[in-house]
Image (tube, rainbow, N blue to C red):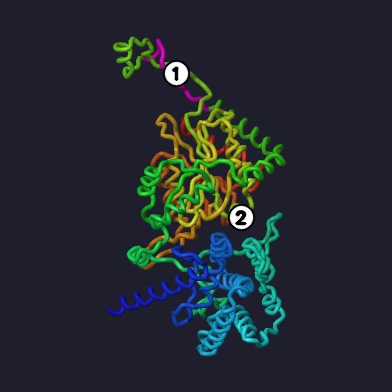
Amino acid sequence: MKVPKQRDNRELRQRRAMNIVWTAAGAYGFQPAFLAFHEDGTPDLYLNSIIGFAHRFYDEEKLTAYVFRLDRSVLSRVFEDIFWLGLEQAIYKRELPNRPVLEDLRREHARRFLLDSVDVSMQQLMMRSEIIQTLKTGRCREILGEPHGIYNPWDRKLYEALDYPAELTTDEIIARTERILRRFFLFRFTVGSRRSWHIFLSNRWQQWLSRLFSLGGKQEASIRPWRQTDAEGAQAKKRGALSFGGRESLAVQLKELAKVYGKPLFSESVRAKLEMALCCGNHRLAHLYFAIGGENDVSQGNRAFWRENQRQYQQCRRHLRDSLQNSLLIYRQPQKISGRQGRFAAARAWRGIFLYDPDVFWQYQEETHADFAVTLLLDASESRREKQAVIAAQTYAIAMALLDCRIPVQVYSFCSVKGVTVFCRLKSLAERDGQGIFSYRTGGWNRDGLALLAAERLLPQDGARQQLLMVLTDANPSDVLDVPAGVGRSRHYMDKTAIEDTSKAVKDLRCHGVKLVALVNSVWAGQEAEISARAIYGKQAVVIRSLDRLAESVARLVEQQISRNGG
């Protein structure tokens, strides 16, 4: 009987923490992405208030996405604590004039942190991150009116850099944190013109390096990501709370997504049926939304990039068109048409008897005709933001080259926003103009396994044509929404878990007759991107390292498809 009691106590503390967050945020019912607790498990009044103020003052979706991106770094705990130290300082300065009691809460938080730091075993202290312990101790000492006591020059410069001003915006907070991490922690690369970035490694390597950098063990009071388990979600529904993914909150979320990505492509009944069929297993907590797309705030910027670089992309288009036309000439498809002579078509005999239709024979014409259609599926996650205009230009060049060769093509993008995998139609099969492709925008995460399964339902239902699904991706699936692993347990949708899930989806589509290939353009180091791409797509993946190779790579992949159909 002890387990239920412990669970009740845990739920009670979580509810108390959420109430603190909601009160500070001035909004109720949303699911906090973070909660803060003391070492004894009791909610931290001050830090949970800071979380609530962050929801009120800043773009929570951007901040959450940034923190979870840091979560994949080798020094994730260190980087996350540095982010919150800077953000806490900015929020305190901003809210103090309106809420003087915040000063007392902050001082009480500082006293308890220093007391907990004294009343701790040497083994636990050694398991903490030394730099974070130094920074937090210095901050708490200053809060209590004492000198910070940080004498190491490197530590002191880092501490001073975390004195964020009150007037920073969301983007400025993220940018300032990035500058600090690059200055004090970053491994730098000098390959080509690539800018420096954080190192991301597999979970096993992170665990090994975490021990080396003393990042494990019991943690002091701090802000940590919080996810609701299946059991807790069920309890929340019984209490009438708006748990993440509930009907009411989902309806509101879909309306918000419609404002950003466009009106629904399907009716709600069709969307719900697709969701019921596809959001199961690893994706049973996820949702789906399909948007028509249209002009948005990035369209003009993407078009401007195309105009500035039109010469090289038009050259890419012509090169691809010529390569495809040559392939179509080599693998000419005999087109079957009805006529008054040729091979007797028994299936059309009834037309001659009842409709007096003389065309009851099959004739075969050798034409440059592609008996397949192409669907371009673009990864539109936040990790693609820096290449947004480039990807739009590449996709436009590919799509127009295919149209030049009379190959039907449609274009969709996908991303995952707060657990909803969003599809945006950029070009339909019927459209001869590919201008809608310039509405390609990035944001959120990428749940590739679910996206591929859903993409199959978007393929044209034409039994006479083979379907070629070409995915433009970084071969790095990851999503903030975890994979359920039993009651009270879950796994992050990233690294091995995400790659295996996406690989399974690829195999399922191929078993259903879909020809699936991948063009990989990644911010990862080349070898890592290639390893991941091979694990997911097998040999039907090409890593694009330059624009010069784009036309060649696409032509080769399509030619393989043509030769298989023609053979």
Mark 2: give few (<14), some (14-19) or many (20+) Cα within 10 Å: some
Disc number for residue 364: 1
Disc number for residue 387: none
In space, the residues marked 2 and 1 are separated at their CA atoms by: 48 Å
Looking at the rendering, the stretch of residues picked out in magenta corresponds to 331-343
- Where residue 94 appears, as percent x and y from the top left, is 63, 71
The residue singled out by tag 2 in the image is 523
- Where residue 446 appears, as percent x and y from the top left, is 51, 53
137 displayed left or right of 451: right
- Where residue 494 appears, as percent x and y from the top left, is 49, 60
- Where residue 541 appears, as percent x and y from the top left, is 53, 46
Q: Amino acid at mark 1?
A: Tyr
- Using the rendered image of the protein, determine whether residue 118 is visible from the camera's viewpoint: yes
Q: Amino acid at mark 2?
A: Val
Q: Residue furthest left?
A: 1
**Camera-side residue: 247 or 458?**
247
Asked if 133 appears above or below 166 in the picture, the reply is below
Q: Earlier in the sequence, mark 2 or mark 1?
A: 1
- Using the rendered image of the protein, determine whether residue 537 is visible from the camera's viewpoint: no
**Camera-side residue: 369 or 22?**
22
Asked if 247 appears above or below 187 in the picture, the reply is above
Q: Secondary structure at mark 1?
A: strand
Q: Residue at x 30, y 15 (%)?
A: 350
**Camera-side residue: 1 or 52?**
52
